[in-house]
C-alpha cells in the first residue's frame, strides 16, 4: 500500500547558476517521483547534477544557484517555493539528508549525544531527559553497540562506519518521510558499505521512508535500489525500474556507462571507453616504445620484498618499555616478476599504502629489506629512484598547484639527471602528447585540468625517467568510472608496449581483477594470501579473501552489451 | 594529561632560563656596574671591595646561578637611578600596566570576535563591508599615530577626556586601581582604545576568515540539513570551531599588549612598567631593564601555557586518553 501523502514528486525542475559570463544550467527539466518505502537511485558522473537535485529538495542550493522553474512536492504540498523559516522547519523533520563523508559531517567539538539532542529538541517537543533517551534509542536502532556509553563520546572516538551510523541516526531524529543519501558509502570500505546499505534498505522497508540514493557506483545501484534515474550533464537520460535500466539500457549514455563498469567475473583486454558526448581521448603509448630502452633481461623477480615491517609510535613515553607501537606492516614478503602487474588489496588501514611508500623508499623499514633486480635498494638510491616511479591516489593534491605542467613532468628527469637538460623539453612534450593531453598542455597549470587529465599528468611525470617499475597507489579511486576506464587502459598499455612492471594497490576488487596478474590480500598489516588473479577470484583460500569477494557489489544485473571480447 | 602539563611546564622553565641568561648578560656586557655605582672619587681598594661584595669576581656560571636564585625570590637588585629595590619599583608600576592591558585586551577580544562573526555571517551586507574597509585603518596605522589622533580629537578639540596620566587612583594596599574613580576610568578610555585597536582589528579579521572557512565545512551543511536554527549553527557549531586558531593568535596578541604597551604608555604618559622601561633605557638602568625583560617573558610563557590548556579544553581530539574505539 502506497501512502500518497508522503510521495516526493519533482516536476520539470531546472536549477541554474548564473555566473558572470553565462548562465550554467546544473539541472535541466528533471522529473522524478519517489514513493514511500522506495529506494530511488540517482546515478551519473561528477557534474551530472545529481547532488544539485538533492540540494534543491533540501532548499540548500549553494549561492548563486536558484530554481528557475519546476516544482518539488511532498504529498500534495509544494515545498520548492517555501521561505527560509518554513524550509528550516521541514529540514530534518520531514526530509533528512546523509552526506558522503562521515569523517567531516559531524562537528568534531561536540559529543554525539549533544548533536543528537539538539537536533531532537529542534523538531520535537521533548525535555532534555526525554531527548537524551531518544538519542540513545536512535543509536541503538542504527546498530551502535553500548549506546548508553557511546552517546557521550566525541565523533573522533568512532570508526568510519560507526560515524556513518551516527549520521544516519541524526537523519532519523524526527522520523522523516524522505531521506536523501548523497554518496553515503563512497568513503567506506566494502564490508562497512554492505552494512550501511543494509541499514538503509531496512529503514526503507520497515519505516516506509522514501530514499533518494545518489551515487556514481553502479554496483551500489544494482544491489540497493528499486528504481534508478540516470543523469548526464544536468538532464535525465533514462529512468525506470533498476532491473530494466541496468539489464536493458536504451539510451546510448546509459549503455556506455554500464559498459565501463569493471566486472569481477570477466577479465577484459581493454575497457570499453565511454564514447558518449564526444569526450573520447586518444593516447598513443605504443609510440613511446620507439624511444624506450629495451628492458634488460632479468632471470629472477624484478622486485623482492622480504619480511618488511613498519611500526608507528602510538603513545610516546620517556621510558622505552612504556612506549606503545602500532604495527602497520607486519613481516610482509612477496616477489614481483618482470613485466607483471602485482595487485595489493585490503581495506583502509590494512597497510597497503605504507607498503607502497616503503618500497618507494619514502618510509624507512623497521625490519626486512627490498631488493630491486637483486640489489638492496639502499645500495644505489639514485639508480633505484630512476627505475621506480609512483602514481598517487589524489590527482588534486599530488601535483604542485604553483608549478606549470611542463615543470612538473620535467622535475624527476631533471632532478635525477637522466637525460641532458637540452632534451628535457622534447621529452616532456612527447610524454604529454602520448598520454593524450597534447604538448601545449605543458604551458598550463594543474587547476586547468580535470581529475582524469591530472592523473594523466601524473603518469607522464612518472614516465619521465623511463622507469622499469611503477607503483600505483589507488590511481583511479578518485575518478569517475569512464575516466577510470581511460586511466586503466593507459596503465595496461604501459605494461604491454613498454614492458613496465607494476605494483597496483587498490581497495576495489573488480578493478584489481581487470588489472593484475597476481594479487596479494592484506589484512591488518599482514599478507594473508597471494595467488594468480583468476585463482584468487575463482577459488579463494583464506576466509578473509572469501569474505571480501562475497561483499563485492554484484554486477550480474548489468548488461553485457559493448563489453567486447574477453581476455581469457 | 598530567604528563602533558608537566612537559609544558618544563619547556616553560627552559625558556625562562634562556631569557634569564640574556637578561643577566646585560649586566656583564652593557657597561660596568662599578662605574655606575661609584662616583669619580674612588680608590682601587673601593673598587676591589665592591667587586668582591657584589660577587663580580666569581666565575660567570656562579654569578648566573646567584642571579637566578635571587630572581626567583623576586630580588632583582637595586635600581641604579632610583637607589630602591627594583622589585618595589615594578610592583608599584605594574597595576597601571596590567589594568590598561586587561581593559584593552577585553575590548579587543569581545569586539573583535563579535565583529568578526557579524562580518562573516553578513558578508555581503553593506555594514559588514564598511566594517571590513574601516578595519584596514586599524591594521595599517601605527599605534603612536592613533594615540596622537585620539588625543587631538577627544582631548584637545572636544575636551571630553584626559590626555595623560591615570587620573585618581584608589590604593588597596598592594594594588592601586584606577577602575574605581571616574577620572581613573575616563583616563583609561583613550589609552585602552589606542592599545587595543590593532589587536581588535586583527582578531576580527582572523575570526571572519576562520568563520568563513568553517561555514563551508560539511558538518555545517549537515547541521543545516538537520533543520537546526541559524543561531545554533552560527554561534554553537561554527564559532566553537573557529576558536582554536583564534586562541593561538589572541594569546600571543595579549602578550604583546603587555609587552608593547611601551609606546602607548609613552604617548599617554601612563605611569606603567613600559614607561619605566623607556626611562630605564635612557639612563642605562640595567637592573630595571633586566627585571622588565624577565617579567615580560614570564607573562608570555604563562599566556602560552594557558593557550595550550585552552586548546585541550576546546578540542576533545587533543585529549590523549580518548583513543578511537
Image (cartoon, coloured by chain):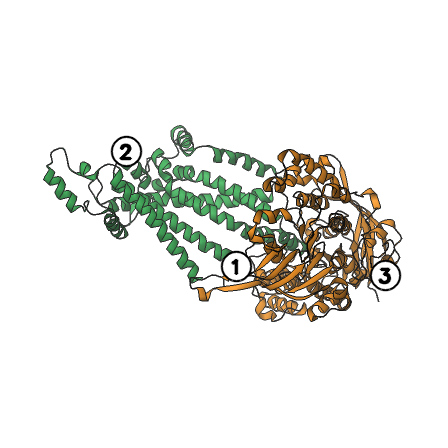
Percent across and percent down for residue B265 are 35, 37
Locate the C terminus of chain A and report the quarter of the image it occupies: bottom right
User: Which disc, if any, is residue A378?
Assistant: none
Chain drawn in orange = A
Decide which of A123, A141 is in the foreground and name it.
A141
- Disc 1/disc 2 C-alpha distance (Å): 49 Å
List the residue tagged with mark 3: A243
Locate the N terminus of chain A and report the quarter of the image it occupies: bottom right
- Disc 2/disc 3 C-alpha distance (Å): 90 Å
Report helix, strand or loop for mark 3.
Answer: helix
Residue at mark 3: chain: A
Percent across and percent down for residue A275 are 83, 46
The earlier-in-sequence mark between 1 and 2 is 2
Report helix, strand or loop for mark 2.
Answer: helix
Residue at mark 1: chain: B
Can you tell which quarter of the image residue A188 is in? Answer: bottom right
List the residue tagged with mark 2: B282
Q: Are marks 1 and 3 on the same chain?
A: no
List the residue tagged with mark 1: B316
Q: Badge 3: how crowded within 10 Å, few (<14), some, or many (20+)? A: some
Percent across and percent down for residue B176 are 30, 46
Decide which of A263, A532 is in the foreground and name it.
A532
Q: Would residue A135 be visible to someone looking at this image?
A: yes
Q: Colour of chain B?
A: green
Residue at mark 2: chain: B
Residue beneath the point at 54% across and 37% down? B131
Percent across and percent down for residue B80 are 21, 39
Amino acid at each position: 500500500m502506497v501512502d500518497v501523502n508522503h510521495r516526493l514528486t519533482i516536476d520539470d525542475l531546472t536549477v541554474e547558476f548564473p555566473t558572470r559570463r553565462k548562465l550554467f544550467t546544473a539541472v535541466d527539466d528533471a522529473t522524478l517521483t519517489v514513493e514511500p518505502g522506495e529506494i530511488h537511485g540517482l546515478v551519473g558522473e561528477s557534474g551530472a547534477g545529481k547532488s544539485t537535485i538533492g540540494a534543491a529538495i533540501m532548499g540548500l542550493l549553494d549561492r548563486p544557484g536558484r530554481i528557475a522553474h519546476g516544482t518539488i512536492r511532498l504529498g500534495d504540498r509544494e515545498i520548492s517555493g517555501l521561505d527560509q523559516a518554513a524550509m528550516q522547519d521541514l529540514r530534518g523533520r520531514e526530509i533528512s539528508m546523509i552526506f558522503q563523508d562521515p569523517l567531516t559531517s559531524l562537528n568534531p567539538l561536540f559529543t554525539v549525544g549533544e548533536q543528537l539532542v539538539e537536533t531532537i529538541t529542534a523538531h520535537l517537543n521533548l525535555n532534555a531527559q526525554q531527548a537524551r533517551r531518544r538519542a540513545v534509542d536512535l543509536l541503538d536502532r542504527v546498530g551502535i553497540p553500548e549506546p548508553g556509553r557511546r552517546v557521550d563520546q566525541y565523533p573522533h572516538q568512532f570508526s568510519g562506519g560507526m560515524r556513518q551510523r551516527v549520521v544516519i541516526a541524526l537523519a532519523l531524529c524526527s522520523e522523516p518521510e524522505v531521506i536523501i543519501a548523497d554518496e553515503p558509502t563512497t568513503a567506506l570500505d566494502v564490508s562497512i558499505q554492505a552494512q550501511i546499505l543494509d541499514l538503509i534498505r531496512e529503514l526503507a522497508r520497515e519505516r516506509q521512508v522514501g530514499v533518494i540514493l545518489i551515487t556514481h557506483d553502479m554496483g551500489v545501484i544494482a544491489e540497493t535500489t528499486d528504481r534508478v534515474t540516470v543523469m548526464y550533464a544536468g538532464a535525465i537520460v533514462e529512468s525506470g525500474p533498476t532491473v530494466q535500466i541496468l539489464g536493458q539500457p536504451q539510451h546510448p549514455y546509459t549503455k556506455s556507462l554500464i559498459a565501463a563498469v569493471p566486472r569481477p567475473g570477466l577479465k577484459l583486454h581493454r575497457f570499453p571507453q565511454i564514447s558518449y558526448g564526444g569526450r573520447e581521448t586518444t593516447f598513443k603509448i605504443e609510440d613511446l616504445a620507439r624511444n624506450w630502452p629495451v628492458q634488460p633481461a632479468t632471470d629472477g623477480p624484478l622486485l623482492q620484498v622480504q619480511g618488511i615491517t613498519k611500526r608507528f609510535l602510538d603513545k610516546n613515553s620517556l621510558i622505552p618499555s612504556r612506549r606503545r607501537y602500532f604495527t602497520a606492516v607486519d613481516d610482509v614478503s612477496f616477489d614481483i616478476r618482470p613485466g607483471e602487474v602485482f595487485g595489493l588489496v585490503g581495506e583502509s588501514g590494512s597497510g597497503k599504502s605504507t607498503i607502497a611508500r616503503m618500497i618507494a623508499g619514502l618510509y624507512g623499514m623497521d625490519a626486512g629489506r627490498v631488493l630491486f633486480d637483486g640489489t638492496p635498494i639502499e645500495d644505489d638510491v639514485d639508480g633505484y629512484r630512476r627505475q621506480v616511479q609512483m602514481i598517487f591516489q589524489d590527482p588534486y593534491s599530488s601535483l604542485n598547484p604553483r608549478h606549470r605542467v611542463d615543470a612538473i613532468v620535467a622535475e624527476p628527469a631533471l632532478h635525477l639527471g637522466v637525460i641532458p637538460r637540452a632534451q628535457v623539453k622534447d621529452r616532456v612534450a612527447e610524454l604529454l602528447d602520448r598520454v593524450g593531453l597534447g604538448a601545449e598542455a605543458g604551458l598550463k597549470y594543474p587547476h586547468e585540468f580535470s581529475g582524469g587529465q591530472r592523473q594523466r599528468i601524473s603518469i607522464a611525470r612518472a614516465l619521465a625517467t623511463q622507469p622499469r617499475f611503477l607503483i600505483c597507489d589507488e590511481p583511479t579511486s578518485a575518478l569517475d568510472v569512464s575516466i577510470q576506464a581511460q586511466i586503466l587502459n593507459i596503465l595496461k598499455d604501459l605494461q604491454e608496449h613498454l614492458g613496465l612492471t607494476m605494483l597496483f594497490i587498490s581497495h576495489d576488487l573488480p578493478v584489481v581483477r581487470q588489472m593484475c596478474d597476481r594479487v596479494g590480500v592484506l589484512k591488518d598489516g599482514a599478507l594473508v594470501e597471494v595467488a594468480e588473479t583468476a585463482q584468487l577470484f575463482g577459488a579463494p583460500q583464506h576466509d578473509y579473501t572469501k569474505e571480501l569477494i562475497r561483499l563485492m557489489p554484484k554486477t550480474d544485473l548489468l548488461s553485457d552489451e559493448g563489453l567486447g571480447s574477453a581476455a581469457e | 594529561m598530567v604528563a602533558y602539563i608537566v612537559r609544558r611546564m618544563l619547556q616553560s622553565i627552559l625558556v625562562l632560563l634562556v631569557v634569564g641568561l640574556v637578561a643577566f648578560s646585560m649586566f656583564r656586557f652593557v657597561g660596568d656596574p662599578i662605574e655606575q655605582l661609584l662616583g669619580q672619587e674612588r680608590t682601587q681598594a673601593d673598587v676591589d671591595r665592591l667587586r668582591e661584595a657584589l660577587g663580580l669576581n666569581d666565575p660567570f656560571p656562579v654569578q648566573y646561578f646567584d642571579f637566578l636564585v635571587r630572581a626567583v625570590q623576586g630580588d632583582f637588585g637595586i635600581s641604579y637611578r632610583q637607589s630602591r629595590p627594583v622589585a618595589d619599583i615594578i610592583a608599584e608600576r605594574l597595576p597601571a600596566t596590567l589594568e590598561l592591558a586587561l581593559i584593552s585586551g577585553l575590548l579587543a577580544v569581545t569586539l573583535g570576535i563579535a565583529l568578526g562573526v557579524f562580518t562573516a555571517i553578513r558578508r555581503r551586507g553593506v555594514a559588514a563591508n564598511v566594517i571590513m574597509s574601516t578595519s584596514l585603518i586599524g591594521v595599517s596605522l601605527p599605534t603612536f599615530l592613533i594615540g596622537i589622533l585620539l588625543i587631538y580629537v577627544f582631548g584637545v578639540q572636544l575636551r571630553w577626556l584626559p590626555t595623560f596620566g591615570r587620573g585618581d587612583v584608589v590604593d588597596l594596599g598592594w594594588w592601586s586601581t584606577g577602575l574605581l574613580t571616574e577620572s581613573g576610568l575616563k583616563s583609561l578610555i583613550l589609552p585602552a582604545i589606542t592599545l587595543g585597536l590593532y589587536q581588535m582589528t586583527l582578531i576580527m579579521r582572523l575570526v571572519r576568515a576562520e568563520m568563513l572557512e568553517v561555514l563551508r565545512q560539511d558538518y555545517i551543511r549537515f547541521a543545516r540539513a538537520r533543520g537546526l536554527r541559524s543561531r545554533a549553527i552560527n554561534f554553537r557549531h561554527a564559532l566553537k570551531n573557529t576558536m582554536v586558531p583564534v586562541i593561538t593568535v589572541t594569546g600571543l596578541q595579549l602578550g604583546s599588549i603587555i609587552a608593547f604597551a611601551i609606546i602607548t604608555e609613552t604617548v599617554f604618559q601612563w605611569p606603567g612598567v613600559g614607561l619605566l622601561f623607556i626611562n630605564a633605557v635612557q639612563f642605562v638602568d640595567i637592573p630595571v631593564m633586566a627585571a622588565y625583560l624577565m617579567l615580560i617573558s614570564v607573562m608570555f610563557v604563562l599566556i602560552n601555557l594557558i593557550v595550550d590548556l585552552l586548546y585541550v579544553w576546546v578540542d576533545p581530539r587533543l585529549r590523549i586518553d580518548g583513543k578511537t574505539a
